[in-house]
């Protein structure tokens, strides 16, 4: 089998490439990079990996012919705003490694076909977490005492406005309300039909964020 990951330079792309290369079926993996200088040494030296220069914004630079599957990652932002900036915001709230690994696993299993088209997969963390769980995870990673403060529902917008761009305040407020008891996502979480559990724990995710911020 032969698969393409585009772009392969992001955290999600790297995780997808690694998961594909680790699979016992030994597929051939092609990674698309705008800058070939960003190809990890561990990939470039792998016999089943090939790096190709290309750009999703330039269709003429892409060739998907003759492959069994493609993982393409584009931020769901089509209003002309900065896709890269939006992707970074999204990546702060999900495990990019879990996304990459899940995409690779689903791609490897496409031979069995999908019951729906398009197929929507709800990717969740390995467990449900409370506010106290988040507090303990931050304390574990930072080695500091973390204080938990209550923000009432009607004050969420004012709270987010203190440190987020105005264009994101509404989205974060809506997201927060949706996961609270009685919210839309809280209700949906109890009836999901096509959910997957990731591997990254809170400590795993926070440690990467902490290490990146302090390097």
Image (cartoon, helix red, strand yellow):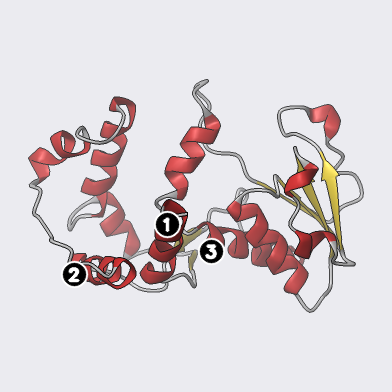
Q: Nearer the viewer, mark 2 or mark 3?
A: 2
Q: Name the residue under label 1.
A: 209
Task: Name the residue at the front extreme.
Answer: 215
User: Mark 1 vs mark 3: which is more N-terminal?
Assistant: 3
Q: Nearer the viewer, mark 2 or mark 1?
A: 1
Residue at x 9% of width, y 39% of height: 155
Residue at x 24% of width, y 48% of height: 176
Instruction: Please say if the residues under marks 1 and 3 sit with CB atoms less than 8 Å apart.
Output: no
Left or right: 26 as drawn, with respect to 198: right
User: Mark 2 vs mark 3: which is more N-terminal?
Assistant: 3
Left or right: 101 as drawn, with respect to 164: right
The answer to whether 33 is drawn above or below residue 56 in the figure is below
Q: How crowded is mark 1: few (under 14 residues within 10 Å), some or many (20 or more)?
A: few
Left or right: 153 as drawn, with respect to 208: left
Q: Name the residue under label 2.
A: 132
Q: Mark 3 points at which residue?
A: 98
- In space, the residues marked 1 and 3 are separated at their CA atoms by 15 Å
Residue at x 77% of width, y 45% of height: 37
Disc 1 is placed on an element classified as helix
Q: How crowded is mark 3: few (under 14 residues within 10 Å), some or many (20 or more)?
A: many
Question: Could you tell me if residue 114 is visible in this image?
Answer: no
Q: Position of residue 32 (x, y in %)?
A: 78, 45
Q: Nearer the viewer, mark 1 or mark 3?
A: 1
Which quadrant of the figure contains the N terminus?
Answer: bottom right
Question: Could you tell me if residue 42 is visible in this image?
Answer: yes
């Amino acid at each position: 089998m032969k698969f393409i990951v585009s772009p392969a330079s992001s955290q999600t792309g790297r995780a997808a490439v690694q998961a594909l290369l680790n699979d016992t079926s030994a597929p051939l993996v092609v990674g698309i990079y705008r800058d070939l200088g960003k190809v990890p040494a561990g990939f470039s030296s792998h016999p089943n990996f090939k790096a190709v220069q290309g750009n999703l914004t330039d269709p003429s630079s892409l060739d998907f012919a003759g492959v069994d599957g493609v993982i393409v990652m584009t931020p769901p932002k089509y209003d002309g705003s900065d896709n890269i900036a939006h992707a970074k915001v999204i990546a702060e709230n999900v495990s990019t490694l879990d996304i990459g690994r899940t995409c690779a696993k689903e791609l490897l299993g496409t031979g069995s076909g999908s019951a729906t088209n398009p197929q929507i997969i709800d990717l969740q963390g390995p467990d449900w977490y409370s506010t106290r769980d988040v507090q303990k995870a931050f304390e574990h990673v930072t080695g500091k005492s973390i204080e938990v403060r209550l923000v009432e529902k009607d004050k969420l917008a004012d709270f987010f406005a203190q440190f987020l761009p105005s264009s994101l305040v509404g989205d974060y407020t809506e997201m927060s309300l949706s996961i609270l008891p009685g919210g839309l996502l809280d209700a949906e979480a109890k009836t999901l039909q096509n959910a997957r559990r990731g591997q990254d724990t809170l400590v795993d995710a926070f440690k990467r964020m902490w290490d990146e911020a302090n390097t």
